[in-house]
Image: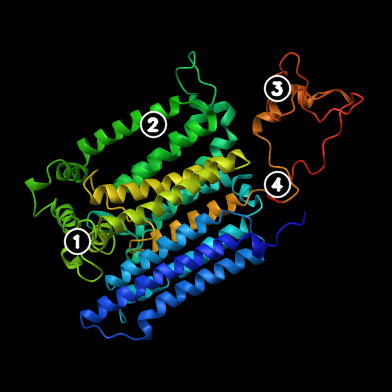
Amino acid sequence: MKAASPWEQRRPERELLLICLGGIGLGVILVMGSLHGVGRPLGLANLLPFFLYALSLAGLHLALVMAGFRGDQILVVAVAFLAGFGLLAQTRLGAFAPGGGEAELNDFAFVGGLGIMLALALGFMSGRYRTLAAGHWVWVWAGISLLLVLVVLVTGQRFRGAVFGAGFITPTELLKVTFVLFAAAYIDRQAKALGVWVFHGLLPPWRPLAPLVGVWVALVVLLLVQRDLGMVLMLGLIPPILLTLGTGRWGYLGLGLGGAGLLGWLLLAVFQHGERRIQAWLAPFQDPTGDSWQVLQGLSGMYAGGLWGEGFGAGNPEYTPIAESDFIYAVIGEELGFVGTALMLAFFLLLFLRGLRIAYGSRTPFGLLLASGLTTVLATQTLLNIGGVTNFIPLTGITLPFISQGGSSLLTAFAILGLLLAISDGEAPGTQARAPRTASANPAKRHRPAGAPAASPHPGHSDPPPPGRAPALGRKRRGGAPAAASPDSSRDARD
Protein backbone atom coordinates (compact mmCIF):
# COMPACT_ATOMS: atom_id res chain seq x y z
CA MET A 1 0.00 0.00 0.00
CA LYS A 2 1.38 3.36 -1.03
CA ALA A 3 2.24 5.65 1.86
CA ALA A 4 0.40 8.95 2.08
CA SER A 5 2.25 12.10 1.07
CA PRO A 6 3.50 14.49 3.79
CA TRP A 7 0.80 16.97 2.75
CA GLU A 8 -1.90 14.37 3.33
CA GLN A 9 -0.32 13.06 6.54
CA ARG A 10 -0.49 16.47 8.19
CA ARG A 11 -4.02 17.19 6.99
CA PRO A 12 -5.53 16.96 10.53
CA GLU A 13 -3.05 19.57 11.75
CA ARG A 14 -3.94 21.88 8.88
CA GLU A 15 -7.68 21.60 9.50
CA LEU A 16 -7.33 22.18 13.24
CA LEU A 17 -5.05 25.17 12.66
CA LEU A 18 -7.71 26.72 10.41
CA ILE A 19 -10.30 26.25 13.14
CA CYS A 20 -7.85 27.78 15.61
CA LEU A 21 -7.32 30.78 13.34
CA GLY A 22 -11.08 31.21 13.05
CA GLY A 23 -11.47 31.29 16.83
CA ILE A 24 -8.62 33.76 17.28
CA GLY A 25 -10.07 35.87 14.45
CA LEU A 26 -13.36 36.10 16.33
CA GLY A 27 -11.40 37.23 19.38
CA VAL A 28 -9.68 39.90 17.28
CA ILE A 29 -13.08 41.35 16.34
CA LEU A 30 -14.07 41.51 20.01
CA VAL A 31 -10.76 43.11 20.98
CA MET A 32 -10.98 45.72 18.24
CA GLY A 33 -14.53 46.50 19.32
CA SER A 34 -13.42 46.97 22.92
CA LEU A 35 -10.60 49.29 21.86
CA HIS A 36 -13.00 51.33 19.71
CA GLY A 37 -15.41 51.52 22.63
CA VAL A 38 -12.84 53.29 24.82
CA GLY A 39 -12.03 55.78 22.08
CA ARG A 40 -8.70 54.43 20.87
CA PRO A 41 -7.97 55.07 17.16
CA LEU A 42 -7.85 51.91 15.08
CA GLY A 43 -5.78 51.24 11.98
CA LEU A 44 -3.88 48.55 10.13
CA ALA A 45 -1.10 48.78 12.72
CA ASN A 46 -3.48 47.30 15.29
CA LEU A 47 -3.94 44.21 13.13
CA LEU A 48 -0.23 43.71 12.41
CA PRO A 49 0.37 41.24 15.29
CA PHE A 50 -2.47 39.02 14.09
CA PHE A 51 -1.30 39.10 10.47
CA LEU A 52 2.14 38.02 11.69
CA TYR A 53 0.52 35.33 13.83
CA ALA A 54 -1.44 33.89 10.88
CA LEU A 55 1.54 34.04 8.49
CA SER A 56 3.80 32.41 11.08
CA LEU A 57 1.41 29.49 11.56
CA ALA A 58 1.11 29.04 7.79
CA GLY A 59 4.89 29.08 7.42
CA LEU A 60 5.29 26.65 10.32
CA HIS A 61 2.86 24.16 8.79
CA LEU A 62 4.37 24.37 5.30
CA ALA A 63 7.89 23.92 6.67
CA LEU A 64 6.84 20.78 8.58
CA VAL A 65 5.22 19.37 5.44
CA MET A 66 8.21 20.11 3.22
CA ALA A 67 10.59 18.51 5.74
CA GLY A 68 8.48 15.35 5.92
CA PHE A 69 8.08 15.86 9.66
CA ARG A 70 6.18 13.00 11.32
CA GLY A 71 5.90 14.43 14.82
CA ASP A 72 2.91 15.24 16.98
CA GLN A 73 0.24 17.35 15.27
CA ILE A 74 -2.04 18.04 18.24
CA LEU A 75 0.86 19.61 20.14
CA VAL A 76 1.30 22.17 17.34
CA VAL A 77 -2.39 23.07 17.45
CA ALA A 78 -2.42 23.40 21.26
CA VAL A 79 0.52 25.79 21.32
CA ALA A 80 -0.93 27.75 18.38
CA PHE A 81 -4.17 28.34 20.29
CA LEU A 82 -2.42 29.27 23.55
CA ALA A 83 -0.07 31.68 21.77
CA GLY A 84 -3.01 33.28 19.97
CA PHE A 85 -4.98 33.50 23.20
CA GLY A 86 -2.04 35.24 24.84
CA LEU A 87 -1.82 37.61 21.89
CA LEU A 88 -5.46 38.59 22.37
CA ALA A 89 -4.97 39.12 26.10
CA GLN A 90 -1.90 41.30 25.62
CA THR A 91 -3.66 43.35 22.96
CA ARG A 92 -6.58 43.92 25.30
CA LEU A 93 -4.15 45.17 27.95
CA GLY A 94 -2.48 47.55 25.49
CA ALA A 95 0.82 45.67 25.28
CA PHE A 96 0.93 46.36 21.53
CA ALA A 97 0.13 50.05 21.63
CA PRO A 98 2.27 51.97 19.08
CA GLY A 99 5.18 53.94 20.48
CA GLY A 100 6.22 51.61 23.29
CA GLY A 101 9.62 49.99 22.96
CA GLU A 102 8.68 47.03 25.11
CA ALA A 103 5.40 46.67 23.23
CA GLU A 104 7.18 46.58 19.89
CA LEU A 105 9.56 43.94 21.25
CA ASN A 106 6.67 41.77 22.43
CA ASP A 107 4.96 42.41 19.10
CA PHE A 108 7.38 39.98 17.46
CA ALA A 109 8.28 37.74 20.41
CA PHE A 110 5.81 35.03 19.43
CA VAL A 111 7.05 35.09 15.83
CA GLY A 112 10.61 34.53 17.02
CA GLY A 113 9.33 31.85 19.39
CA LEU A 114 7.67 29.93 16.57
CA GLY A 115 10.91 30.21 14.60
CA ILE A 116 12.90 28.74 17.51
CA MET A 117 10.38 25.93 17.91
CA LEU A 118 10.55 25.09 14.20
CA ALA A 119 14.37 25.20 14.11
CA LEU A 120 14.69 22.83 17.09
CA ALA A 121 11.99 20.48 15.81
CA LEU A 122 13.57 20.12 12.37
CA GLY A 123 17.17 20.27 13.58
CA PHE A 124 16.77 17.37 16.01
CA MET A 125 14.12 15.29 14.22
CA SER A 126 14.64 11.65 13.18
CA GLY A 127 16.39 10.82 16.44
CA ARG A 128 19.05 13.52 16.17
CA TYR A 129 18.00 14.81 19.60
CA ARG A 130 20.15 11.98 21.02
CA THR A 131 23.26 13.98 20.10
CA LEU A 132 22.35 16.37 22.95
CA ALA A 133 23.45 13.66 25.40
CA ALA A 134 26.50 12.41 23.49
CA GLY A 135 30.11 12.82 24.57
CA HIS A 136 30.86 15.67 26.93
CA TRP A 137 27.56 17.47 26.32
CA VAL A 138 26.25 16.38 29.69
CA TRP A 139 28.85 18.58 31.41
CA VAL A 140 28.42 21.37 28.87
CA TRP A 141 24.77 21.69 29.92
CA ALA A 142 25.81 21.74 33.58
CA GLY A 143 28.40 24.45 32.92
CA ILE A 144 25.95 26.58 30.93
CA SER A 145 23.38 26.32 33.73
CA LEU A 146 25.83 27.51 36.37
CA LEU A 147 27.22 30.24 34.11
CA LEU A 148 23.75 31.67 33.42
CA VAL A 149 23.06 32.21 37.11
CA LEU A 150 26.54 33.60 37.82
CA VAL A 151 26.32 36.11 34.97
CA VAL A 152 22.97 37.41 36.21
CA LEU A 153 24.32 37.75 39.76
CA VAL A 154 27.39 39.68 38.62
CA THR A 155 25.84 41.93 35.97
CA GLY A 156 22.18 42.05 37.02
CA GLN A 157 20.15 44.60 38.91
CA ARG A 158 17.76 44.07 41.81
CA PHE A 159 14.09 44.96 41.30
CA ARG A 160 11.17 44.07 43.58
CA GLY A 161 13.49 41.86 45.61
CA ALA A 162 14.72 39.74 42.69
CA VAL A 163 17.78 40.07 40.44
CA PHE A 164 17.27 40.64 36.70
CA GLY A 165 19.70 40.83 33.83
CA ALA A 166 20.45 43.92 31.78
CA GLY A 167 17.25 45.48 30.45
CA PHE A 168 15.20 43.48 32.99
CA ILE A 169 15.53 40.30 30.95
CA THR A 170 15.81 36.96 32.72
CA PRO A 171 18.46 34.72 31.11
CA THR A 172 17.93 32.22 33.92
CA GLU A 173 14.73 31.17 32.11
CA LEU A 174 17.03 29.02 29.96
CA LEU A 175 17.66 26.84 33.03
CA LYS A 176 14.34 25.18 32.24
CA VAL A 177 16.06 23.69 29.19
CA THR A 178 19.74 23.41 30.10
CA PHE A 179 19.26 21.85 33.54
CA VAL A 180 16.73 19.33 32.22
CA LEU A 181 19.17 18.41 29.44
CA PHE A 182 21.93 17.89 32.01
CA ALA A 183 19.78 15.84 34.39
CA ALA A 184 18.29 13.67 31.63
CA ALA A 185 21.67 13.00 29.98
CA TYR A 186 23.42 12.25 33.28
CA ILE A 187 20.70 9.91 34.58
CA ASP A 188 20.55 8.13 31.23
CA ARG A 189 24.30 7.59 31.35
CA GLN A 190 24.41 6.47 35.01
CA ALA A 191 21.04 4.68 35.18
CA LYS A 192 22.48 1.27 36.09
CA ALA A 193 24.70 2.59 38.90
CA LEU A 194 21.96 4.89 40.22
CA GLY A 195 19.54 1.96 40.42
CA VAL A 196 21.74 -0.09 42.79
CA TRP A 197 20.82 1.05 46.31
CA VAL A 198 23.07 0.14 49.24
CA PHE A 199 22.44 -1.01 52.83
CA HIS A 200 19.86 -3.60 51.79
CA GLY A 201 18.23 -1.22 49.35
CA LEU A 202 17.53 1.50 51.91
CA LEU A 203 19.92 4.22 50.70
CA PRO A 204 20.79 5.49 47.21
CA PRO A 205 24.38 5.14 45.96
CA TRP A 206 26.17 8.34 46.90
CA ARG A 207 29.06 8.11 44.45
CA PRO A 208 27.11 8.25 41.14
CA LEU A 209 24.53 10.56 42.74
CA ALA A 210 27.03 13.15 43.99
CA PRO A 211 27.66 15.02 40.67
CA LEU A 212 23.94 15.44 39.98
CA VAL A 213 23.18 16.60 43.52
CA GLY A 214 26.24 18.87 43.54
CA VAL A 215 25.18 20.76 40.41
CA TRP A 216 21.61 21.02 41.69
CA VAL A 217 22.67 22.35 45.12
CA ALA A 218 24.98 24.94 43.53
CA LEU A 219 22.13 26.19 41.31
CA VAL A 220 19.68 26.32 44.21
CA VAL A 221 22.09 28.34 46.37
CA LEU A 222 22.74 30.85 43.58
CA LEU A 223 19.02 31.16 42.80
CA LEU A 224 18.22 31.74 46.47
CA VAL A 225 20.70 34.60 46.47
CA GLN A 226 18.69 36.00 43.56
CA ARG A 227 15.47 35.27 45.48
CA ASP A 228 14.10 33.38 42.48
CA LEU A 229 11.91 31.07 44.55
CA GLY A 230 9.79 30.00 41.60
CA MET A 231 12.78 28.68 39.67
CA VAL A 232 14.00 26.86 42.79
CA LEU A 233 10.67 25.05 43.06
CA MET A 234 10.67 24.07 39.38
CA LEU A 235 14.24 22.77 39.40
CA GLY A 236 13.62 20.97 42.69
CA LEU A 237 11.09 18.64 41.06
CA ILE A 238 13.28 17.59 38.14
CA PRO A 239 15.91 15.32 39.82
CA PRO A 240 13.55 13.09 41.87
CA ILE A 241 11.09 12.63 39.00
CA LEU A 242 13.76 11.80 36.42
CA LEU A 243 15.66 9.56 38.85
CA THR A 244 12.47 7.62 39.50
CA LEU A 245 11.74 7.26 35.79
CA GLY A 246 15.34 6.43 34.88
CA THR A 247 15.97 3.79 37.55
CA GLY A 248 12.52 2.55 38.55
CA ARG A 249 13.36 3.32 42.20
CA TRP A 250 10.41 5.02 43.91
CA GLY A 251 12.65 5.82 46.85
CA TYR A 252 14.06 8.75 44.87
CA LEU A 253 10.60 10.31 44.76
CA GLY A 254 10.22 9.87 48.51
CA LEU A 255 13.60 11.46 49.15
CA GLY A 256 12.66 14.31 46.82
CA LEU A 257 9.46 15.02 48.75
CA GLY A 258 11.39 14.96 52.02
CA GLY A 259 14.02 17.30 50.59
CA ALA A 260 11.29 19.66 49.36
CA GLY A 261 9.87 19.86 52.89
CA LEU A 262 13.32 20.58 54.32
CA LEU A 263 13.96 23.24 51.71
CA GLY A 264 10.61 24.88 52.47
CA TRP A 265 11.48 25.02 56.17
CA LEU A 266 14.84 26.63 55.38
CA LEU A 267 13.14 29.25 53.21
CA LEU A 268 10.84 30.14 56.08
CA ALA A 269 13.62 30.15 58.68
CA VAL A 270 16.28 32.03 56.73
CA PHE A 271 14.57 34.19 54.09
CA GLN A 272 12.16 36.85 55.27
CA HIS A 273 10.98 37.24 51.67
CA GLY A 274 9.58 33.70 51.65
CA GLU A 275 8.05 34.05 55.10
CA ARG A 276 6.07 37.14 54.05
CA ARG A 277 4.60 35.28 51.09
CA ILE A 278 3.57 32.37 53.29
CA GLN A 279 1.86 34.72 55.75
CA ALA A 280 0.08 36.52 52.90
CA TRP A 281 -1.17 33.16 51.66
CA LEU A 282 -2.37 31.87 55.04
CA ALA A 283 -4.01 35.12 56.18
CA PRO A 284 -4.49 37.47 53.20
CA PHE A 285 -6.93 39.81 55.00
CA GLN A 286 -4.49 40.63 57.80
CA ASP A 287 -2.49 42.92 55.49
CA PRO A 288 -4.90 43.85 52.64
CA THR A 289 -2.94 46.91 51.54
CA GLY A 290 0.53 45.37 51.91
CA ASP A 291 1.85 41.93 50.98
CA SER A 292 -1.67 40.58 50.32
CA TRP A 293 -2.79 43.45 48.09
CA GLN A 294 -1.90 41.72 44.80
CA VAL A 295 -3.70 38.48 45.61
CA LEU A 296 -6.83 40.22 46.94
CA GLN A 297 -7.12 42.45 43.87
CA GLY A 298 -6.81 39.44 41.59
CA LEU A 299 -9.41 37.47 43.56
CA SER A 300 -11.78 40.45 43.46
CA GLY A 301 -11.48 40.65 39.68
CA MET A 302 -12.17 36.92 39.20
CA TYR A 303 -15.14 37.11 41.59
CA ALA A 304 -16.58 39.98 39.53
CA GLY A 305 -16.24 37.89 36.36
CA GLY A 306 -18.50 35.11 37.62
CA LEU A 307 -19.44 32.34 35.19
CA TRP A 308 -19.48 34.18 31.85
CA GLY A 309 -17.35 37.22 32.62
CA GLU A 310 -18.00 40.90 32.09
CA GLY A 311 -16.96 40.76 28.43
CA PHE A 312 -13.91 41.84 26.47
CA GLY A 313 -13.11 45.42 27.38
CA ALA A 314 -15.72 45.62 30.13
CA GLY A 315 -13.38 44.70 32.98
CA ASN A 316 -11.03 46.87 35.01
CA PRO A 317 -7.53 45.36 34.61
CA GLU A 318 -6.01 48.65 35.74
CA TYR A 319 -6.95 47.69 39.29
CA THR A 320 -5.06 44.38 39.06
CA PRO A 321 -1.32 44.60 39.82
CA ILE A 322 1.11 43.37 37.16
CA ALA A 323 -1.94 42.45 35.06
CA GLU A 324 0.03 41.85 31.84
CA SER A 325 2.42 39.36 33.46
CA ASP A 326 1.98 37.59 36.79
CA PHE A 327 -1.78 38.23 37.18
CA ILE A 328 -3.02 37.87 33.62
CA TYR A 329 -5.07 34.84 34.68
CA ALA A 330 -7.10 37.12 36.96
CA VAL A 331 -7.82 39.49 34.06
CA ILE A 332 -8.99 36.60 31.88
CA GLY A 333 -11.24 35.41 34.70
CA GLU A 334 -12.72 38.88 35.11
CA GLU A 335 -13.52 39.49 31.44
CA LEU A 336 -14.21 35.93 30.21
CA GLY A 337 -15.35 34.37 33.46
CA PHE A 338 -15.06 30.76 34.54
CA VAL A 339 -15.88 29.57 31.01
CA GLY A 340 -12.95 31.47 29.48
CA THR A 341 -10.45 30.25 32.06
CA ALA A 342 -11.77 26.68 31.74
CA LEU A 343 -11.21 26.81 27.96
CA MET A 344 -7.66 28.01 28.43
CA LEU A 345 -6.96 25.35 31.08
CA ALA A 346 -8.33 22.66 28.76
CA PHE A 347 -5.70 23.55 26.14
CA PHE A 348 -2.98 23.58 28.80
CA LEU A 349 -4.09 20.13 29.94
CA LEU A 350 -4.07 18.94 26.32
CA LEU A 351 -0.52 20.28 25.94
CA PHE A 352 0.71 18.42 29.03
CA LEU A 353 -1.01 15.16 28.07
CA ARG A 354 0.60 15.26 24.62
CA GLY A 355 3.97 15.88 26.25
CA LEU A 356 3.52 12.83 28.50
CA ARG A 357 2.38 10.78 25.52
CA ILE A 358 5.53 11.77 23.65
CA ALA A 359 7.63 10.73 26.65
CA TYR A 360 5.83 7.38 26.94
CA GLY A 361 6.17 6.71 23.20
CA SER A 362 9.87 7.60 23.02
CA ARG A 363 12.06 4.79 21.73
CA THR A 364 15.12 5.77 23.76
CA PRO A 365 15.66 6.17 27.53
CA PHE A 366 17.08 9.66 27.00
CA GLY A 367 13.98 10.67 25.02
CA LEU A 368 11.75 9.44 27.84
CA LEU A 369 13.69 11.42 30.46
CA LEU A 370 14.03 14.59 28.39
CA ALA A 371 10.36 14.73 27.34
CA SER A 372 9.21 13.99 30.91
CA GLY A 373 11.45 16.69 32.36
CA LEU A 374 10.41 19.35 29.84
CA THR A 375 6.71 18.57 30.31
CA THR A 376 7.17 18.70 34.10
CA VAL A 377 8.72 22.17 33.82
CA LEU A 378 5.81 23.57 31.78
CA ALA A 379 3.18 21.95 34.00
CA THR A 380 4.87 23.17 37.19
CA GLN A 381 5.19 26.72 35.86
CA THR A 382 1.50 26.76 34.95
CA LEU A 383 0.46 25.39 38.35
CA LEU A 384 2.64 27.88 40.24
CA ASN A 385 1.18 30.84 38.36
CA ILE A 386 -2.49 29.87 38.50
CA GLY A 387 -2.19 28.49 42.04
CA GLY A 388 -0.60 31.73 43.24
CA VAL A 389 -3.18 33.99 41.57
CA THR A 390 -6.10 31.96 42.98
CA ASN A 391 -4.40 31.77 46.43
CA PHE A 392 -4.30 27.96 46.23
CA ILE A 393 -0.57 28.11 46.93
CA PRO A 394 1.77 30.99 47.97
CA LEU A 395 2.55 33.53 45.26
CA THR A 396 5.86 32.90 43.46
CA GLY A 397 5.98 35.56 40.74
CA ILE A 398 6.10 32.97 37.93
CA THR A 399 4.62 33.92 34.54
CA LEU A 400 1.92 31.92 32.74
CA PRO A 401 3.45 30.12 29.70
CA PHE A 402 2.46 31.53 26.28
CA ILE A 403 -0.02 33.98 27.89
CA SER A 404 1.93 36.38 30.09
CA GLN A 405 4.08 39.21 28.78
CA GLY A 406 7.79 38.42 28.89
CA GLY A 407 10.15 37.70 26.03
CA SER A 408 12.56 35.37 27.85
CA SER A 409 9.83 33.17 29.29
CA LEU A 410 7.96 33.01 25.97
CA LEU A 411 11.03 32.10 23.93
CA THR A 412 12.05 29.42 26.44
CA ALA A 413 8.56 27.89 26.36
CA PHE A 414 8.72 27.69 22.56
CA ALA A 415 12.17 26.09 22.79
CA ILE A 416 10.74 23.43 25.11
CA LEU A 417 7.97 22.72 22.60
CA GLY A 418 10.52 22.45 19.79
CA LEU A 419 12.46 19.74 21.64
CA LEU A 420 9.23 17.89 22.45
CA LEU A 421 8.27 17.93 18.78
CA ALA A 422 11.71 16.63 17.80
CA ILE A 423 11.35 13.70 20.22
CA SER A 424 7.86 12.96 18.90
CA ASP A 425 9.25 12.53 15.37
CA GLY A 426 11.05 9.38 16.54
CA GLU A 427 13.90 7.68 14.75
CA ALA A 428 14.82 7.97 11.09
CA PRO A 429 12.90 5.59 8.80
CA GLY A 430 14.61 2.22 8.55
CA THR A 431 16.91 2.77 11.54
CA GLN A 432 16.85 1.13 14.94
CA ALA A 433 16.62 3.00 18.22
CA ARG A 434 19.64 2.99 20.51
CA ALA A 435 19.61 0.07 22.89
CA PRO A 436 19.64 0.75 26.64
CA ARG A 437 23.10 1.07 28.15
CA THR A 438 22.59 -1.99 30.29
CA ALA A 439 22.74 -4.14 27.16
CA SER A 440 26.51 -3.73 26.92
CA ALA A 441 26.91 -5.21 30.38
CA ASN A 442 25.53 -8.57 29.28
CA PRO A 443 28.55 -10.93 29.16
CA ALA A 444 26.61 -13.57 27.28
CA LYS A 445 26.04 -11.08 24.50
CA ARG A 446 29.66 -9.89 24.36
CA HIS A 447 31.32 -13.33 24.42
CA ARG A 448 28.77 -15.46 22.61
CA PRO A 449 30.52 -18.06 20.44
CA ALA A 450 29.98 -17.85 16.74
CA GLY A 451 26.79 -19.58 15.68
CA ALA A 452 25.39 -19.83 19.21
CA PRO A 453 21.88 -18.44 19.80
CA ALA A 454 21.48 -15.13 21.56
CA ALA A 455 20.75 -15.26 25.28
CA SER A 456 17.72 -12.96 25.01
CA PRO A 457 15.66 -11.62 22.14
CA HIS A 458 15.52 -8.20 23.79
CA PRO A 459 18.63 -6.06 24.21
CA GLY A 460 19.46 -5.29 27.81
CA HIS A 461 17.68 -8.37 29.24
CA SER A 462 19.79 -11.40 30.09
CA ASP A 463 17.05 -13.49 31.74
CA PRO A 464 16.53 -16.89 30.03
CA PRO A 465 13.17 -17.59 28.37
CA PRO A 466 10.47 -19.32 30.43
CA PRO A 467 10.48 -23.14 30.40
CA GLY A 468 8.78 -24.56 27.37
CA ARG A 469 8.95 -21.33 25.42
CA ALA A 470 11.47 -20.72 22.68
CA PRO A 471 13.13 -17.34 22.17
CA ALA A 472 11.17 -15.16 19.74
CA LEU A 473 13.89 -15.03 17.10
CA GLY A 474 11.46 -15.34 14.25
CA ARG A 475 8.44 -17.26 12.99
CA LYS A 476 8.75 -21.03 12.68
CA ARG A 477 8.74 -22.49 9.22
CA ARG A 478 6.63 -25.54 8.59
CA GLY A 479 9.75 -27.67 8.68
CA GLY A 480 10.63 -26.41 12.13
CA ALA A 481 13.58 -24.13 11.21
CA PRO A 482 13.32 -20.55 12.39
CA ALA A 483 12.85 -17.97 9.70
CA ALA A 484 15.17 -14.98 9.54
CA ALA A 485 13.80 -11.76 10.91
CA SER A 486 12.42 -9.37 8.33
CA PRO A 487 14.86 -6.64 7.35
CA ASP A 488 12.04 -4.11 7.75
CA SER A 489 11.11 -5.23 11.28
CA SER A 490 12.92 -2.27 12.85
CA ARG A 491 11.20 0.33 10.70
CA ASP A 492 9.00 2.84 12.36
CA ALA A 493 5.40 1.67 12.33
CA ARG A 494 4.37 5.00 10.87
CA ASP A 495 6.32 4.48 7.67
Numbered disc in front, either 2 or 1? 1
Q: Earlier in the sequence, mark 2 or mark 1?
A: 2
Residue visible at 70% across and 62% down?
5
Give me the C-alpha separation between circle 4 and circle 1: 51 Å
Give me the C-alpha separation between circle 2 and circle 3: 31 Å
Q: Earlier in the sequence, mark 1 or mark 3?
A: 1
Mark number for residue 289? none
Residue visible at 35% across and 60% down?
155
Mark number for residue 492? 4
Q: Secondary structure at mark 2?
A: helix
**Residue occupied by mark 2:** 256
Mark 1 neighbour class, 10 Å CA radius: few under 14, some 14 to 19, many 20 or more: some
Give me the C-alpha separation between circle 4 and circle 3: 25 Å
Q: Which quadrant holds residue 458? A: top right
Residue visible at 45% across and 40% down?
215
Q: Earlier in the sequence, mark 4 or mark 1?
A: 1
**Identity, as a three-letter code, of the amino acid under mark 4:** Asp
**Identity, as a three-letter code, of the amino acid under mark 3:** Ser
Which residue is nearer to you in this view: 81 or 201?
A: 81
Residue 314 at what x, y percent from top left? 20, 70
Instruction: Check contact, mark 2 vs mark 4: CB within 8 A.
Output: no
**Residue occupied by mark 3:** 462
Which residue is nearer to you in this view: 97 or 35?
A: 35
Q: Secondary structure at mark 1?
A: loop
Residue 179 at what x, y percent from top left? 47, 46
Residue 346 at what x, y percent from top left? 38, 52
Instruction: Check contact, mark 4 vs mark 3: CB within 8 A.
Output: no
Residue 60 at what x, y percent from top left? 55, 67
Q: Secondary structure at mark 4?
A: loop
**Residue occupied by mark 1:** 321
